[in-house]
Amino acid sequence: MIFILATTEVHKIPVTILSRCQRYDFRRIDSGTIAERLQELVEKEGLQVEEKAIRYIARMGDGSMRDALSLLDQCTAFYLGEKLTYEHVLEVLGAVDQSVFGKLLEKLLAAEVKGVIQTVEELVLQGRELTQMTIDFTWYLRNLLLVTEGEEAAELLEISAEQFHQLQSLRKKVEDETLFHYIRVFSELSNQMKFSGQKRILLEMTLIRLCRPEMEKKEDALWDRLRRMEQRLTVMEEEPSARPVIREGETKLQQEAQSPRPALPEALTEEVQYVAKNFREIIQEASPLLRICLKKARLSAGEGNLLLVVMQAKWRRMQ
């Protein structure tokens, strides 16, 4: 008699059991092998499935033949008797087309908040699953990061030649540091969305922060802020109207030296400075009604070492 123990969490098995077992580690199946097996089953069952749809289902199986077969059964059940296309698979699984990710990334790089929010609105109206969309977008950024000049990278990334060429053209517009930053942000976001009831709000707030890198305080967000500053400087160089006007034969420092400087007020006496510094503590000793009025007041220096208490218009009318 042979006992077979199968698990995906081998670290939870006690050492006393592991020491008495022969261990065989099964690796994930590559998407190409899964796609070939799915194609065989489709032909055997007489189903009409688009090749692009099979490749996408194989990739969504994430190395598991069982999961890929379950996804294929789910998709064919929705379109029984019809040809299963790539668009049908996206609709059933709530996934997003790769071309949408390219447009979304370009809008993020251009800091187009309105365009980014409109993209999310379109995906919601199409019934796309936002958590799956976040995971797929993270993989899209990963593929974009690994794109190289050689054609052999297309096989490594397990994508079609058409998608590979699209990534190549977009890769030239994005720096490595920006991709690392985006991958970290969306990896954290996908984990948060799994347990959140407000997935859309989380996604929109994250996209807005990426369009406004000054809102983020983490170190990898500094690269985005520097990149935006470089873009603004480039615009100033290309557009003469955005540059400061300097008269011929004069430098900016000379112009500032020639411009009239505002007269500085005379120094206030120590008593006035003491009252101004401790004004909030002093008004605590006033009557309740006067204290309420003075809390709305502000101080201003007047002529002749006078300290003015400036009231709001409504309080002046009451007096």
Image (cartoon, grey):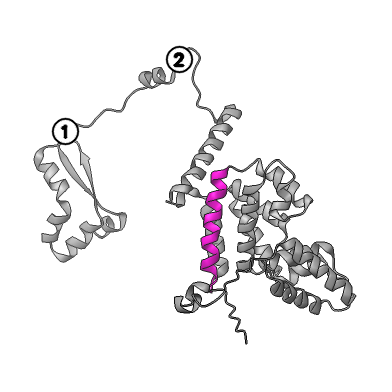
Left/right of residue 51 with respect to residue 244 in the rendered view: right
User: Could you say which is closer to the camera, residue 187 or residue 152?
Assistant: 152
x, y (%) of residue 231?
Answer: 56, 37
| Labelled pair 1, 2 in contact (Cβ < 8 Å) | no
For this rendering, which residue is in front, 141 or 131?
Answer: 141
**The N terminus - image quarter:** bottom right
Q: Which residue is mark 1?
A: 267
Residue depicted at 49% across the width and 17% down the height: 247
Q: Residues within 10 Å of mark 2 (few under 14, many from 20)?
A: few
Furthest toward the bottom, the residue is: 1
Depth order, front residue of 198/284: 198
Q: Residue placed at 53% from the left, 65% from the top?
A: 202
Residue at horizontal 62%, vertical 84%? 2
* Region in magenta: 176-198
Q: Is residue 190 left or right of residue 51?
A: left
- Where 82 sits versus 144, above or below? below
Count of numbered labels shown in the rendering: 2
Location of residue 283 with respect to 307 vertically, above or below: below
Mark sitting on residue 46: none
| The magenta stretch spans residue 318 | no
> At label 2, which amino acid type do we have?
Glu
Say whether disc 1 or disc 2 marks the residue closer to the N-terminus: 2
Q: Secondary structure at mark 1?
A: loop
Which residue of the protein is positioned furthest toward the right in this rendering?
46
Q: Is residue 82 visible?
A: no
Where does label 2 land, which residue?
A: 250
Quarter of the image where one finds residue 130: bottom right
